[in-house]
């Protein structure tokens, strides 16, 4: 339900009404009755202002007994009825008041509020406009007209009236909140945040403001400030399941999984049928490698909401991690229909392959996700070609020349083909990471190497590496950081300084093949670790592959370089967080995807010391070229 803050005008009217009360009464009223009614009204308004509503109603009722058409008593009785939710009665009373005082701006404004509560937003807007004609600086009328216009879909005009209300009364948290809602609905999040922040500063404990502000701050990536909003709501409303969920969600985004889990549990306890909270609880458990608990909650989320893409996708990855491919691969397809994934996938202009015979057919492998994913799964081109297809592979531009070396690839596309091109050229297409699903019972590995570096480039790199390495027995390439935009990069990347103990091992020449922001960490080990920095000379994956061919070993965190070295069949040691990506399986030290890979796993999330010790031991016991 959309919530807007409504201004009801009555409390400030006492000073405006009483001096002119005689003008609202019949001119032939006896002066004694006049004075009695004035006193009753003043007392009733005092009770009303103080929240003693029954007492106020008694005084208004007494006035109406004395004068049934008394506009003020009818008006404020209508305000009481409105507060009680009796909108029809409020309309009847205020209409009676308007019959006596058709030019009363406050009365018109409040009748407009009643119309809005009755769902007649066009009438509400008309009444508020009439009130503004009579009193152009009537702040509540501008605010309430903004509310009606929002319901009628006129965002631009609503914004104008909210801004007018704010200018007339800058200290109104209600007006700031409503302007924030208009800006949020218009997609102007930074401006909306500013208004919500003003509203929060004016009313720090207003939970509606805190909820809207927190959600926008979370979406903007300002997790600390968002957490502060939700933490305040949780304290004020300990039975609010949404607040617990949102705070858990923010802690989740901050990788504070231990703190997120009890919040998700509380949200689920308060609202047991909330599939989203159950799914997020499972995700937080997965992040801490508590897989058995996570699996139970993913399945519970799917019981509550069968077909919900997020738990299907997450459960699929969990099962693939366990090697349960028969159930895992179909669930993994849900990556295409999650909220985050859906915008990145679409149908192509030819048939999506469902396993039909391919003899004589033209087939397009479609690019998706990261370069590492494309390297890992383009291997299936050989199986497709073995079925008789002519296979084209659309991949990232920096991977194009290497993809052309994959067995079964007839042609490489380094840019998205048009629908017209696809319709004219291909019989079938398939997303690259959906290919394993199409080969049930087949091995999930391919003979390695299934990618090959250019021989001329490799020879040039070998000469350069030999010169730089000198008498060192072993040449080792090193990658310590992945893409900082990756959800788990804070865990999968290792600070270069954490690897410094490796520098003390003798007989090794070290080559930094790190690219991107992580390369700046070279300055942190300058003078302590003679690393030959080569990242700036690696312009695509073909040049990286040629360099890797000249090395004895690559040591890398979970990045595309790990996949590249594995696809080349080169020795590669992969450093993994305690909760690594699904494709590296569980507990094992080898890889079902890359026979030349050796895996080094954290014992606890964020702790690289045991991994470094294992690397030291492995390097010390293998003094020559690395074995696997």
Image (tube, grey):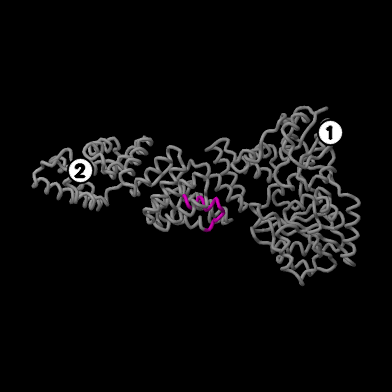
- Which of these two is toward me, 603 or 381? 381
Residue 352 image offset from top left, x and y in percent: 71, 31
Q: Which residue is mark 1?
A: 386
Residue found 84% across the figure and 37% down from its top: 410
Q: Which residue is mark 2?
A: 73
Q: Which sits earlier in the primary sequence, circle 1 or circle 2? A: 2
Mark 1 neighbour density, 10 Å: few (under 14) some (14–19) many (20 or more): some
- Which of these two is toward me, 123 or 382? 123
Q: Nearer the viewer, mark 1 or mark 2?
A: 2
Question: In the rendered image, is residue 422 in sight?
Answer: yes
Find the distance from the CA under tag 1 to the CA under tag 2. Answer: 89 Å
Residue 581 image offset from top left, x and y in percent: 68, 49
Question: In the rendered image, is residue 1 in sight?
Answer: no
Q: Quadrant of residue 447?
A: top right
Residue found 75% across the figure and 41% down from its top: 415
**Considering the numbered disc 1 on the image, is that residue within a helix, a strand or a loop?**
helix
Q: Is residue 428 above or below residue 461?
A: above
Could you tell whether 74 is left or right of 35 in the image?
A: right
In the displayed orientation, state which residue is furthest to the bottom: 527
Could you tell whether 473 is left or right of 609 in the image?
A: right
Mark 2 neighbour density, 10 Å: few (under 14) some (14–19) many (20 or more): many
Residue found 69% across the figure and 62% down from its top: 608
Residue 137 image offset from top left, x and y in percent: 34, 49
Q: Is residue 333 above or below residue 496?
A: above
Image mark for residue 133: none
Quadrant of the frame with the C terminus: bottom right
Stretch of the chain drawn in magenta = 212-224
Indicate yes or no whether the magenta region holds residue 228.
Answer: no
Residue 338 image offset from top left, x and y in percent: 60, 40
* Magenta stretch, overall SS: helix
């Amino acid at each position: 339900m959309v919530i807007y803050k409504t201004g009801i005008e009555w409390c400030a009217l006492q000073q405006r009404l009483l001096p002119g009360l005689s003008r609202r009464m019949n001119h032939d009223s006896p002066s004694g009755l006049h004075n009695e009614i004035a006193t009753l009204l003043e007392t009733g308004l005092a009770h009303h202002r103080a929240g003693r509503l029954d007492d106020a109603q008694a005084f208004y009722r007494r006035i109406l007994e004395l004068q049934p058409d008394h506009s003020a008593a009818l008006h404020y009785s209508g305000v009481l009825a409105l507060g009680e939710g009796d909108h029809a009665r409020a309309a009847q009373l205020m209409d009676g008041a308007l019959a006596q005082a058709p030019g009363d701006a406050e009365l018109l404004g409040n009748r407009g509020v009643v119309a809005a509560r009755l769902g007649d937003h066009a009438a509400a807007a008309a009444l508020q406009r009439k009130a503004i004609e009579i009193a152009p600086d009537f702040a509540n009328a501008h605010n309430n007209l903004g509310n009606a216009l929002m319901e009628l879909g006129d965002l631009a005009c609503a914004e104008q009236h909210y801004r007018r209300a704010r200018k007339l009364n800058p200290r109104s948290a209600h007006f700031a909140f409503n302007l924030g809602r208009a800006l949020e609905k218009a997609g102007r999040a930074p401006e909306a945040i500013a208004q919500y922040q003003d509203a929060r500063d004016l009313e720090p404990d207003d939970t509606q403001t805190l909820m809207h502000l927190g959600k926008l701050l979370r979406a903007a990536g300002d997790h600390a400030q968002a957490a502060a909003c939700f933490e305040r709501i949780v304290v004020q409303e300990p039975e609010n399941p949404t607040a617990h969920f949102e705070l858990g969600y923010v802690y989740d985004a901050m990788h504070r999984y231990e703190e997120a889990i009890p919040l998700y549990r509380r949200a689920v306890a308060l609202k047991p049928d909330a599939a989203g909270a159950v799914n997020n609880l499972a995700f937080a458990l997965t992040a801490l490698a508590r897989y058995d608990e996570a699996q139970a909650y993913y399945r519970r989320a799917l019981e509550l909401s069968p077909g919900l893409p997020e738990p299907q996708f997450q459960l699929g990855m969990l099962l693939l991690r366990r090697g349960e491919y028969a159930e895992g691969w179909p669930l993994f397809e849900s990556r295409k229909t999650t909220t985050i994934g859906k915008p990145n996938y679409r149908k192509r202009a030819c048939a999506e392959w469902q396993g039909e015979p391919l003899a004589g057919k033209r087939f397009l492998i479609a690019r998706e996700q990261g370069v590492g994913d494309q390297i890992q799964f383009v291997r299936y081109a050989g199986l497709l070609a073995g079925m008789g297809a002519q296979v084209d592979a659309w991949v990232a531009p920096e991977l194009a020349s290497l993809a052309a070396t994959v067995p079964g690839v007839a042609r490489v596309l380094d840019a998205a083909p048009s629908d017209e091109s696809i319709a004219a050229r291909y019989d079938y297409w398939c997303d690259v990471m959906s290919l394993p699903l199409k080969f049930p019972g087949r091995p999930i590995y391919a003979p390695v190497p299934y990618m090959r570096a250019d021989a001329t480039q490799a020879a040039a790199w070998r000469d350069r590496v030999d010169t730089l390495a000198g008498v060192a027995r072993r040449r080792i390439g090193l990658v310590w950081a992945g893409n900082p935009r990756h959800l788990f990069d804070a865990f999968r990347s290792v600070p270069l300084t954490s690897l410094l103990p490796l520098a003390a091992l003798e007989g090794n020449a070290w080559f930094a093949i790190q690219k991107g922001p992580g390369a700046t960490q070279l300055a942190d080990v300058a003078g302590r670790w003679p690393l030959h920095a080569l990242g700036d000379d690696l312009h695509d994956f073909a040049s990286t592959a040629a360099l890797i061919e000249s090395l004895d070993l690559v040591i890398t965190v979970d990045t595309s370089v790990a996949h590249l070295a594995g696809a080349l069949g080169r020795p590669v040691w992969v450093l993994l967080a305690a909760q690594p990506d699904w494709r590296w399986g569980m507990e094992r030290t080898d890889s079902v995807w890359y026979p030349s890979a050796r895996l080094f796993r954290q014992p606890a999330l964020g702790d690289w010391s045991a991994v470094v010790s294992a690397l030291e031991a492995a390097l010390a016991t293998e003094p020559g070229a690395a074995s696997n």
